[in-house]
Image (cartoon, rainbow, N blue to C red):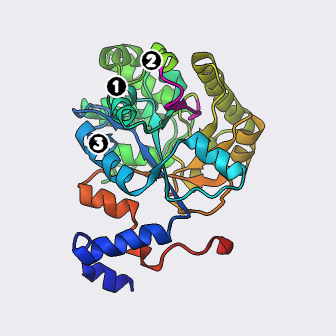
């Protein structure tokens, strides 16, 4: 059947009909999409990452989703699952890391359509007094300091290969909690400080923006304080990351964060103890980034997200509809 659908053509009349029927057949599936930066121009922190979507591109995504799915808030989804109520063709929009464009660019697009959003900011960079470790690395690499970063990592005992593997790829595969200190040392070596770069570029949300956001449409939830790989930390360190972020968000918004989104979010980046910590610290849900299908009445602590693809509108629609793999349809709820 999949081969037949693939030959049918995504945009042909028959393809559109099959897609419409399949959406109804799969109406007990829950799609949670994740965006990062919504900005008209690329920055040194997003160049080459695929994490930036142009506001016009994002608006096309939203219009497609609104026409074909039920866009609901994460809070409503969690409440329905807790009451054992099945959402139908539900889509939830989330935004990671706390980029400034989430409120300045994405929020007006969604607000005009009365569509809710959930932002998972990294709380240590709110106010632009520091940079995420990934952004420190991005700035250093963009400004020709890859060799210095590699030397600093070797001095720390890291087996950085002199071959064809770029430092950025090596770091993303082997990141541990001490890396920010290494990157800060390299920045100082080249006459820069993360605080000065953050103040110059101001890539993140300001405290007053978060405090002043309309709570009916904008939810802020936990993405940790510094965006570490939680699985690389002790239980005490994980707890400190989660509680520090929760405290900051509670102070800014007046309510405790609803959910915890694991940084990076793949299976290697968190563990069962992290999920327990999410519950023990008062969160009502936890979300990964493993691109799994949420089918039926899943546990709120086992929700999976998909990063919004950076490509054409057609590629986005194919990603949301998992075309042509959705030909089989989602399995009945009783099989999950």
Q: Nearer the viewer, mark 3 or mark 1?
A: 3
The picture quadrant where one finds residue 7 is bottom left
Residue beneath disc 3: 59
Residue 85 appears left or right of 294: right
Residue beneath disc 2: 209
Q: Residues within 10 Å of mark 3 (few under 14, many from 20)?
A: some
| x then y, percent, for residue 55 | 27, 37
| x then y, percent, for residue 295 | 58, 64
Residue sitting farthest toward the right: 280
| x then y, percent, for residue 325 | 41, 74
Q: Classify mark 1: helix, strand or loop.
A: helix
Predominant secondary structure in magenta?
Answer: loop
Reading the chain from its start, which is encountered first: label 2 or label 3? 3
Give, as a single range, the part of the protein colored magenta. 213-224
Q: Note whether residue 102 is visible.
A: yes
Depicted 313 relative to depicted 185: above or below: below
Depicted 93 relative to depicted 248: above or below: below
Q: Classify mark 3: helix, strand or loop.
A: helix
Residue at position x 22%, y 33% from top? 40
Residue beneath disc 1: 104
Q: CA distance from mark 2 to mark 3?
A: 22 Å
Q: Are marks 1 and 2 in contact (CB under 8 Å)?
A: yes
The picture quadrant where one finds residue 46 is top left
Residue at position x 46%, y 33% from top? 97
Q: CA distance from mark 1 to mark 2?
A: 9 Å
Q: Note whether residue 261 is visible.
A: no
Residue 118 appears left or right of 75: left
Q: Where residue 226 is drawn, which disc sits there?
A: none
């Amino acid at each position: 059947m999949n081969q037949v659908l693939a030959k049918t053509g995504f945009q042909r009349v028959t393809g559109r009909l099959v897609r419409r029927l399949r959406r109804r057949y799969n109406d007990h599936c829950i799609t949670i999409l994740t965006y990062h930066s919504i900005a008209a121009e690329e920055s040194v922190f997003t160049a080459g990452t695929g994490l930036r979507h142009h506001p016009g591109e994002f608006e096309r995504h939203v219009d497609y989703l609104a026409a074909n799915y039920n866009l609901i808030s994460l809070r409503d989804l969690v409440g329905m699952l807790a009451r054992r109520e099945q959402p139908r063709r539900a889509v939830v929009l989330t935004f990671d890391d706390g980029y400034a464009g989430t409120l300045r660019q994405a929020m007006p697009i969604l607000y005009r359509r009365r569509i809710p959003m959930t932002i998972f900011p990294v709380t240590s960079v709110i106010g632009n007094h520091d940079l995420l470790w990934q952004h420190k690395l991005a700035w250093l690499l963009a400004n020709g300091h890859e060799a210095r970063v590699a030397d600093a990592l070797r001095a720390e005992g890291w087996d950085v290969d002199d071959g064809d593997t770029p430092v950025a790829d090596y770091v993303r595969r082997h990141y541990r909690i001490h890396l920010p200190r290494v990157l800060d040392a390299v920045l100082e070596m080249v006459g820069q400080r993360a605080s000065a770069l953050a103040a110059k570029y101001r890539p993140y949300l300001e405290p007053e923006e978060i405090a002043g956001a309309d709570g009916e449409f904008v939810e802020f939830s936990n993405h940790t304080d510094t965006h570490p790989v939680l699985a690389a930390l002790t239980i005490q360190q994980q707890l400190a990351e989660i509680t520090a972020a929760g405290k900051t968000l509670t102070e800014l918004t007046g309510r405790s964060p609803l959910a915890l989104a694991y940084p990076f979010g793949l299976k290697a980046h968190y563990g069962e103890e992290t999920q327990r910590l999410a519950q023990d610290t008062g969160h009502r849900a936890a979300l990964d980034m493993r691109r799994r299908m949420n089918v039926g009445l899943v546990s709120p602590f086992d929700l999976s997200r998909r990063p919004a693809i950076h490509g054409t509108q057609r590629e986005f629609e194919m990603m949301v509809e998992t075309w042509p793999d959705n030909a089989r349809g989602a399995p009945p709820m009783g099989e999950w």
